[in-house]
Amino acid sequence: MAPVVSVGVIAVALLTSASASSSPLGAGIGTHGEVTSAALQAPVSAAVSAPADAMWTAPDAEVPWLGPAIDAELARIAAAQAEAARLAAEAAAQAEAEAALKAAAHKAARDAARRPAGSSAPTVPSSTPVGEVKEYAASLVAADQFGCLDALFQRESGWNPTAKNKSSSAYGIPQALPGSKMASAGADWQTNPMTQVRWGVSYVNARYGSPCGAWAHSESHGWY
C-alpha cells in the first residue's frame, strides 16, 4: 500500500506597507477619480508562510514503488493496443476473404445464367441422371456455395463421371489425380458419380476451405 502523505495548508498573505495601509481611502485618487502616481507607487510586500505542522511530499526517487508501477501500467497499455491492432487486422482479413468468396460465387452464378441453353452439361453416362447428381452435391454444401461447386465441376468434367484427362490422367467429375484417390470415398469410385462428388466436396473443403475458395483458385490459376 502506498504511504499516506499529508500536505499542510500554505497561507499566503499580501501585506501592504504601513504607509499604504495608514493612508485614507481616497488619498491616492485625484479630484476626478484618476489614480495618482503616489497610489501606483505604493510599496507592496508578499509573505508566504506555512503552519508549523506542515508535512511535505517526499521526492519521487524516495518512493520505490512508483517507477515500477508506472512501467507496468505503460506495458499494460501497450499490450492492449497491440491486441486491438491484431484483432482489427484479423477482422479486416476475414472481411476481405468473405468478400472474395461472395464475388466468386456471384460470378459463377452469373456465368451459369449466361450460358446458352444448348451448352448445358451433357448427360452423365451412368444410371444416375445428372440432375440427381447435382441435387446430391447441393446437399453436401451450403446454399451459397453450390454455384461455385457447379461451375467448378462443369469446367473440370461437365459432371461426367467417366471424364478422363488425356495428358494428366485426371479422372471423374472432380478430375482427381490420380483417380484412385477417390477410393477413400468408396470402392465404386470409377462408376458412381455420387462417390466422386462426395470425394470432390471433401477435397475442396479440406484444401481451399470451401467450393468458392476452390473456384476462386481455379479462376486465377486455371486449375484447383
Image: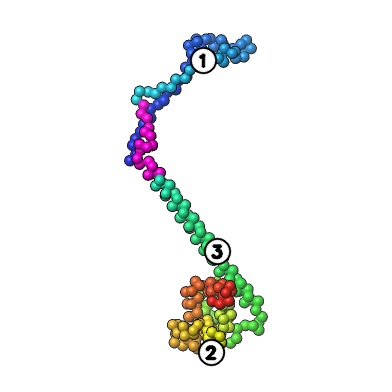
- How far across and down, in percent of the image, does residue 63 sit? 35, 38
* Residue under pointer 2: 126
- Residue in the image at 51% along x and 15% along y: 43
- How far across and down, in percent of the image, does residue 166 sit? 56, 87
Tell me whether circle 2 and circle 1 mark residues in contact (CB < 8 Å): no
Tell me whether circle 2 and circle 3 mark residues in contact (CB < 8 Å): no
- How far across and down, in percent of the image, does residue 29 sit? 59, 12
- How far across and down, in percent of the image, does residue 30 sit? 61, 11
Residue 161 visible here:
no
Query: In terms of image quadrants, where is residue 185?
Result: bottom left
Image quadrant containing the N terminus: top left
* Residue under pointer 1: 43
2 w.r.t. 108: above or below: above
Gap between marks 2 and 3, in whole Å?
41 Å
* Residue under pointer 3: 96
- Residue in the image at 58% along x and 72% along y: 220
Nearer to us of marks 1 and 3 is: 1
Nearer to us of marks 2 and 1 is: 1
Image quadrant containing the C terminus: bottom right
Residue type, mark 2 in image: Ser
